[in-house]
Every structure is written in structure tokens, then in C-alpha cells.
Amino acid sequence: MNFAAQFLYSRVLKNRSPRERFREDEDYDPFWQSYAEQLFSKKDDNKIKKQDVPGLCDLHRCKDGLMRNGLIAQKPPSINPERLKDFGEEDYLNGDVKTWEMKIVSRNEELLTDTLSRIPPSSSTTILSSCNKLIRFEDISAAAFKIQCGVQKTPCMYSRLSKQYGMDIYLKKEYLQYTGSVKERGVLYLLTSLPQDQQRKGVIVASDSNFSMAVAYHASELRIPVFVIMSTSTSPVRVKMCREYGAMVISYGTTAKDSQIHARRLAQENGYLYLEEEDSAVYLSGLGTVGLEVYEQVPKLDAVIFPAGGHCGLLAGSAATLKYLNPHISVIGVESESFPVLQHSLKAGHPAEDQACNNHHFYGDVSGVCFGSNSLQLTGKLVDKVVAVREEDILISMLRLLEYERATVDAEGAIGLAALVAGKLPELKGKRVAVVICSGNLELHLLQQCIARALTLDNTVCRFSLVISDCPGDMSKLLEILAREEARVLDIKQERTFVTSELFTVEVICTVETRDKIHTAQLRNALLERYPTTTWTQR
């Protein structure tokens, strides 16, 4: 077996015990090992060709034993030799190894489906082979190998929130990707799988989503001409970011539908490939690499929580990985109560299209309609549970991530933790749980509004009004009470004109900051004792 095939096969078994690695009667199947070797064999001239110049993803085997996989204009990191110890491949690191290069140039859709007929009946122990014929574990392993130098292997770190919620919480920080979104994984694998002639012609997208941002950046890095059509109502910040990534941005139409129609027309006239986020096997395989990394980084996992909603490709692809590696890991999806698209689609058995969101700027990609039957089928077969959370829970989750992790994320990134904040998963108490924080693209004006609202919901910022006599010293007495109760005054106003009380009185409206809910209750009791007419502004 050549070294590249060994690398793919190693991703399956790196964190498994020796018994799990070689249980022939349950988990181990020589077919997957032989299939990984076939991915990089040179027998099929239509899929693998020798190259004369550097391509999209080159493999270099050097005399010093280091093997690298890099993208254009990026310095490829060496593979850690420690990965090879479990497989007895030290001879690759010691002897003379010939230098050779190869390049994958054909579409991967054929690769993902052409061997299904050769799967022996005894190898049907994997869940994937029975639930979806378009994506299997080795497809995800191939994606991980191909994109390893183009995306970040983000950390999955133990969180200080663990003590607060009574479980070991590990946060997979996918918002640390270059464009701030996990969508880079699927996009990069999708772009590198395009034929060379299409890469020369270019691609075109029509949206302001994280998917478009990822296409703009990675297409530019791969020297693929990229065009992004955005409506005139798109935020100027998004337009600027997309241009900085290297895309040609065109503003057209007042709605997203107008932009899509224009993009399709340009694609037809100029030979561009029109890309939109869908649940193709290639895209889902790229997103599924998140599950592979989580399994490697956190041993003895009990559950993994993902954002869900209409765009559930991350949930479906990662569930395929995790359930193959360990069927006992619970995979949980979280969506909003305002538009439970995924839950309705699972009940109906087909993608639901009648769910609409009136707050797209806040919810982002989780507010879209269900975009495909493949991801829906994978979700129905592999995902253990889908829960819905309120908007208030998402805001509190964003606040907790900012307070404890110094992480600024959007609603899509915070919705997974919101299920723990809201107490929707009591069965996970005392267990080891990973939460995928998948996106951090929140505009500044929205960030300010979200944090202000979250502080109010968390009872750390409160407002009250009371009436005092308009005499010297009365205001200072009120401030003395606030100082004694250790409340921090954020804003204070006096209203003398529009007051319905008796003459020579003033209405004081005060906004204060407290430590927590208990501190707020103490302050309220102290004020009511001195000023019985005190009125607290309800949320």
C-alpha cells in the first residue's frame, strides 16, 4: 500500500484502541483499506495523470522522508512522523525514497459512487452504506487529506463553562477559519474537485452568505476567476470583505432572487460555473471533516452538538463521520424555535419550503430553507436528536462565549451552546460534550444590539423609574442607596415637564448594572423599601 493511502486509512484508526482497530468480526473490514489505496493508485489514467507543472493539490515525496501536500502560494507543513508509528511505516522515513508527483484532476462524484457495487455483504456494518449512497467515510477521509493545507485545523478546547453547566464542554472553534466560517471546508474540496477547464473559465455565486465568502477567498487562492453577485441591499461591510478576498463583486437587483437570476444569466453567457450551497457528496464530505477532527482531538466523547436549521450539511456530514468511528456518540442538532425547518422536514419526509425567517441578518445561514434530500436523509438516519431554542437563549449563549471564551460569534455559531444554556439536554449532565462553534461573522452594529439585549435578559442591566421631590439632597440620597448596594449607574435622567404626579416632583429614570439576578433582587428590595412607587421596566 502506498503512503498516501496509508495516511487516509490512518485517519480512521488514530484514536481507537488496538481491540477496536482489528476486530474483524465487527469494525475492521479490509475493503476500506483497499479502497483507500485505490484512491491514489495510478491505474486509472482517466482520473490520475502525471503533471509537468504544480497543480491544485500536489504530493511530494522527498529524500529526507518528509511528505507534503500543499496548495498554490502556501507553504505546506510536514506530516508529523508520530502518525506513522501505529502502522509500522518507519521505513518510509529512513530509506531512500524516489521523488514523484501526481495530481487528481477528475470529478469526485464518480469516485464517491463507483465502488458501491463492489462492497461485499459482510462490510455493511457501516451505517453510511445503508442510508446514503452518495457519501461514505472514505470520501470524508479523502476530503480531509486533500484540504489539510488549505484550511485551519481549529482547536477543540476545554471550556470554563463546564463547571457552570455540570458537564465537560469542549468548544470546536471553527470561527477561527480565515473567513470566519466552517463553510471553507466544503468549498475548498468542491473547488479543488472541479475540472481544469472549468477552473480556467471561473465560478460565480449570488449571495452574501458565509458560503459566498468562502468561495471568494479560496477561488482567489487557487487562481480561479470568481464573481459574486450581491443585491443593492447587502451590507457594505460584506461587499468590502468579499472584494478584499479577491472576488469581482457586482451589485445587481434589490432582492437575492434578482441577483441569482442575473448570476445564472452571466454563467450561461460566459461559461462560468454557477455555485450555490447544496448537499452534493463533495460538499458534504468537506464539511464532514469537522467530525473527524473532533473525534481525534477529544477522546472518549459522549456527544457532539452542531447547528442545524435548513442548511444542515455540517450536521449531516459530521454525523456520517462520527457514527462510523463510534456509533455510541450522540449527535445532536440545534435550530431556532422561530423556524424549525429541519424538524418539520424530518416529520414530512421531504424538505419543507414553507418556513420563512423575518430576521435573516441575525440568524444567517441557519434561517434558510432545507436545501436537499441527501443531507435530510443522512440527518434522519444518523442524528440522534434535534432540539429547538428561543432567540433569548441564543443571545445569552453569545454573551457567555464573549464572557468566558472571549469569542465573538454570530447566532449560527452560538446556537449549539444555546441548547445547554436553555437546559434542553439534561441527559448530558456529567458527560463529555463537544460543541461546534461554526461561525463568527457578526457585523458590528448587530453585535452591539445583541450584547445590550443579552445583558438585559441576563438581569445584569436593569432600568427603573421613581418619583422624588425636587429639593436639594433628594437625588444624592438615591445615589447613596445605589452606592451602598454596589450598583453601577450607567445612565440617569430627570423628567420635570411630562410628569403626572404632584407639583415640585421629578421623575428619575435610572439604568444600572448589577452582578447577577440575586444582586438585582437585593437592589430592588432596597429601593422599594425607601421609594414604594418604584417601577421596574420589564424586558
Image (cartoon, rainbow, N blue to C red):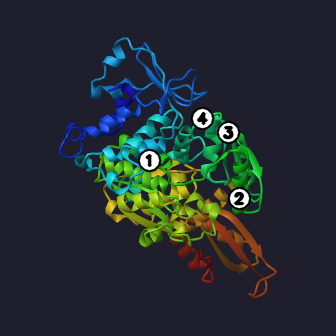
Q: Which residue is drawn at 47% across and 38% down?
A: 153
Residue 335: image location, x then y, percent: 49, 64
Disc 4: which residue: 196
* 157 or 509, nearer to the observer: 157
Q: Residues within 10 Å of mark 4 (few under 14, many from 20)?
A: some
Residue sticking out furthest to the right: 497
- Residue 418 seen in render: yes
Give percent across and percent down for residue 151. Answer: 53, 38
Compute the Cα span from label 2 to label 1.
Answer: 30 Å
Question: Which residue corresponds to mark 3?
Answer: 201
Residue visible at 67% across and 54% down in the picture: 208
Q: Which numbered disc flags the more N-terminal residue, 4 or 3?
A: 4
Q: In which quarter of the image is residue 476?
A: bottom right
Q: Position of residue 145 (x, y in %)?
A: 44, 35
Amino acid type at image mark 1: Gly
- Type of the residue with mark 4: Gln
Please name the residue that numbered disc 2 is placed on.
Answer: 261
Distance of label 2 from label 3 (alpha carbons): 19 Å
* Amino acid, disc 3: Lys
Q: What element carries label 3?
A: helix
Residue beneath disc 1? 288
